Image (tube, rainbow, N blue to C red):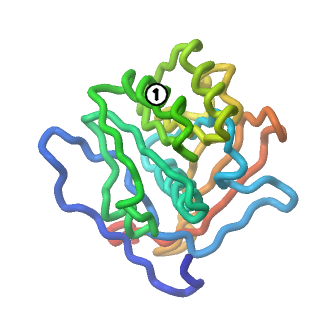
Amino acid sequence: MIGAGTRADMLVLDSLPQGVTRGATVLASRPLSSNSIPLMPRWGLQEIAGMLTELSGVGGSACLTLATSIVLDAQRQEETTAWITSNNSSFFPLDVAAAGIDLEALAVVRVPDAPSVARAADRLARSGAFGLLVLDLGANARVPTALQARLRSSARKHDTAILCLTEKRGIASSLGPLVSLRGEARIRRLSDDRFACELRVLKDKHRGPDWVHTEICCGPEGMY
């Protein structure tokens, strides 16, 4: 975490491997400050450990930025993390590294297609070796209820946080009834190079919905 007032430019890869599409951009290299509504939960690994969580957004949302902050929190707690994605999508390694993530400590699992993402996560979750699994499911995500049940069972047994990233609006249905927490990622411009990355919680079985977490971040060149 860098101090307020320190510039943290985001580095963006100029190109990706052939056939790999450019996904959502990590908006900020590092949050400059973080705040939540008083007495409300915070967006962190501890709050989603042992649960099946869904984070959604569309277009230029803060979904990837907020997911990256969870990975950073997990690494600070020395929890093993895996990011599972399909072959036709990828985050930008230099963006994620600029956010403070240790790429050498982040396992990235590439599978043929979106339906394979949840199946791969099931195998990893049952191993009990991971503190955090990030599932990049994309648009039109579908995870069978039986598979959700296995993921939730493994999450509870091993105290693993399972974070599903989906591309849809908040008014759309969640992945299913076994999702314990579902949030919508949004972004607001505050100034030329400052953005508010907001998490609006729509569903929270443990603490109730309608709480908000905000991280104030600096944007990459080109967004100023």
Q: Which residue is drawn at 58% across and 14% down?
A: 145
Percent of width and height locating residue 12:
28, 64
**What residue is drawn where x is 53% and y is 61%?**
75
Q: In this view, does 34 lie to the left or right of 58?
A: right
Residue 55, percent from left and from top: 57, 40
The foreground one among 207 and 173 is 207
Residue 10's place in the image compared with 129, above or below, is below
Q: In this view, does 208 lie to the left or right of 183?
A: right
Left or right: 213 as drawn, with respect to 83: right
Picture quarter with the N terminus: bottom right
Residue at 72% over, 66% down: 35
Q: Can residue 172 be seen in this view?
A: no
| Residue identified by numbered label 1 | 123
Position of residue 81 in the picture relative to residue 115 (left or right): right
* Quadrant of the rendering where the C terminus is positioned: bottom left
Q: Could you tell me how many numbered marks the image carries?
A: 1
- Tell me the amino acid under the disc marked 1: Arg
Residue at the right extreme, as displayed: 39
